[in-house]
Image (spheres, coloured by chain):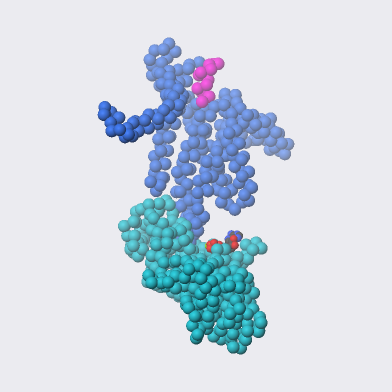
Amino acid sequence: MTNAALPIKAPGAPVARPVRRFGLAWLGMVPFLLFAFLFLVAPTVFLVGGSLQNAKGTFTLENFANLFTPQIMQTYENSLEISIVTAVIGGIFGLLLAYAVISGGLPGILRSALMTFSGVASNFAGVPLAFAFIYTIGRAGLFTVFLKSVGIDLYNSNGFSIYSKIGLEVVYLYFQFPLMVLIIAPAIDGLKKDWREAAENMGASSFQYWRRIALPILMPSLLGTMILLFGNAFGAQATAYALTGGFIDIVTIAISRQMRGDVLFNPNQGYALAMGMVIIMAISIAGYSLLQRRSERWLK
Amino acid sequence: MAFLELTGVQKRFGEFAAVHNFDLAADAGEFVSFLGPSGCGKTTTLRMIAGFERPTAGKIVVNGADITDKAPNQRNVGMVFQSYALFPNMTVADNVGFGLKIRKRSKDQIKKRVGELLELIHLPDKASRYPWQLSGGQQQRVALARALAIEPQVLLLDEPLSALDAKIRVSLRNEIRAIQRQLGITTVYVTHDQEEALSLSDRIVVMSEGRVEQIGTPFEIYNFPSTGFVARFVGTLNVLSAKVIDPGAGTLEVAGQPIRAAKPISGGHAGGMITVALRPEIIQLGSRADLNNLSGIVDDVTFLGSIVRVRIKFTDGSGVISFDTFNNPHLAVPDRGTAITVSFPTEACLVLDQAEAAAAAAPEDLDAA
Ligand SMILES: Nc1ncnc2c1ncn2[C@@H]1O[C@H](COP(=O)(O)OP(=O)(O)OP(=O)(O)O)[C@@H](O)[C@H]1O
Ligand SMILES: [Mg+2]
């Protein structure tokens, strides 16, 4: 670029500086790029390739066309519903809980207890979580039996089942709202007491303070966390599989059915299903960025 | 009748009494400062006026209406916070107009009023900026405009300048005072900076450990402190312990040297110890037959710009006394260790009240003030 390209250089001039810095910076990127290539680019290429072939390896759009059959559309709908419901409910509960513990004047010990619990619970997923729920509110779970003994039949009278969509949502919420608590807590900490008092001082009610100050300030973090919760639920498979034995109709399980192939076996269809998920995630992340940018306008 | 009245106001936090029996009657348009060291209860008292703390006892009346039990958002009292507390998600204009928006004023009304206020604080071109794009001084001016927008009955400021650097502090405090005069708004200003309080206030409330020590004009507070605490906290006073020789004649002995007070010593008895206060600026270098004289050894010379402060140690080790002299190029600054004599008029001896004497006699020197 600069002197480095010149054949003659002034003695002692810091010639190669800019070039060397450039080189080192790239060197630092290498592990990440390698990682991204191996686990993001390569699989995506593989996925795209696979989804555009049939079992014999010839090009086809059939797998994608199949996504629009009512049955698969229903599968996506279920996944979306579960993800949105648990992200929104988990988000709201998490926000309220974190706010109560941080700013609600509750004893400090409660806060650290909640944070510790949230740290553990937000990582408690998959098979152990599913079984924990089965053993407590499953058809023969401890709590179910207890309720029955006091005259409440969870499974017959209310149509409730831990193995259904609602059941799965309840189970997902178990890790969704602690995750919200963990991520939103620092943002709530950032709300200054003075802002609330200044608002009150100018005549604002608590509601007006929340509407015009606290929520707008929290909005970027709220949106960010909700999209994370959405992705978290959308991509979950093991919990649902262990809980329902693979009998719930959501996309991740549909994919595994196609890949493992007990009854159905069409990996290429599985790739197309996965591509559908990638596209939905991409759309939601794009939508999120848009909202995020708008809610962060005052930061820039 | 006074416009802002605090009667017997107390605040306890559990067992701890942060404010004891606070009485104040401020007239409409008056600028009152609360002055005192950290933790003396200034902010707590201010927050009780704003409604953020409920008094444990006592009554707060503004313009004849008892507001003691009113919620903060029902008081129409404007507050300026030390931290500015501007809403980061709103522009300057939206911050200033916030109170009016809450009061459901029309868009046009709000716009007009915000424009006037930004003019008043000399930031008319910053309306669409966000708080983080402003300097500290600008932010605090916006906070002032925001508090004034709602046309509060009383304006409260809690150390509004303490986060700013010295130059801006002085210019902004003058600006605050000018605006306050222009609007004629009753104002309570909290500070721990005596110079700020003296230069701004109509009256000063000097506080210590939750108690009012003295309420008076800056002139009264500075020249006639009623307690040792006030004398030490306001200004850089010499506090000396003196032995009473003849109470009736007002003769005393400081470090074994005779001096005379202008008035008879009430309450003192011959041979007893009392405390006298002496302003550094009233003491002159050199002995004079018609004045009180005290001799000692120069202990330290401090150059303070326009003045030079000289500290003298009494040879019997009973204490120190400081005096100020104006700086000029021909000034003969005494060297450390030389013996000198200073003089001061009899009226300069402030005899502090007897209850104070014991406390003040403790070897506490003016450097702490
Ligand atoms: N919410 C509270 N709970 C318990 N004690 C408090 C509370 N608020 C204030 N105090 C105590 O009351 C006393 C007075 O506090 P205050 O904030 O009024 O002091 P201040 O004069 O404003 O001091 P500073 O100049 O440092 O701001 C302090 O000892 C403080 O610790
Ligand atoms: Mg304070």
Give the number of callouts.
Answer: 0
Q: Name the one closer to the observer, A101 or B27.
A: B27
Q: Where in the figure is residue A214, as x and y percent of width and height?
A: 48, 51
Q: Name the one closer to the observer, A94 or A276.
A: A94
- Residue farthest to the right, as pictured: A149
Residue B238 on the magenta segment: no
Q: Residue at x 49, y 80 (%)?
A: B287
Q: Where in the figure is residue B7, as x and y percent of width and height?
A: 57, 74
Residue A261 on the magenta segment: yes
Q: Residue at x 58, y 82 (%)?
A: B258
Tint of chain B: cyan
Q: Name the one closer to the observer, A17 or B138.
A: A17
Magenta-drawn segment: A252-264
Residue B104 seen in this snapshot:
no
Question: What kind of secondary structure does the magenta stretch mostly adopt?
Answer: helix
| Residue A279 placement, left or right of B360 | left
Q: Quadrant of residue A40?
A: top left
Q: Residue at x 61, y 40 (%)?
A: A116
Residue B283 lies, with reference to residue A4, above or below; the image says: below
Q: Residue at x 59, y 69 (%)?
A: B364
Q: Which chain is blue?
A: A
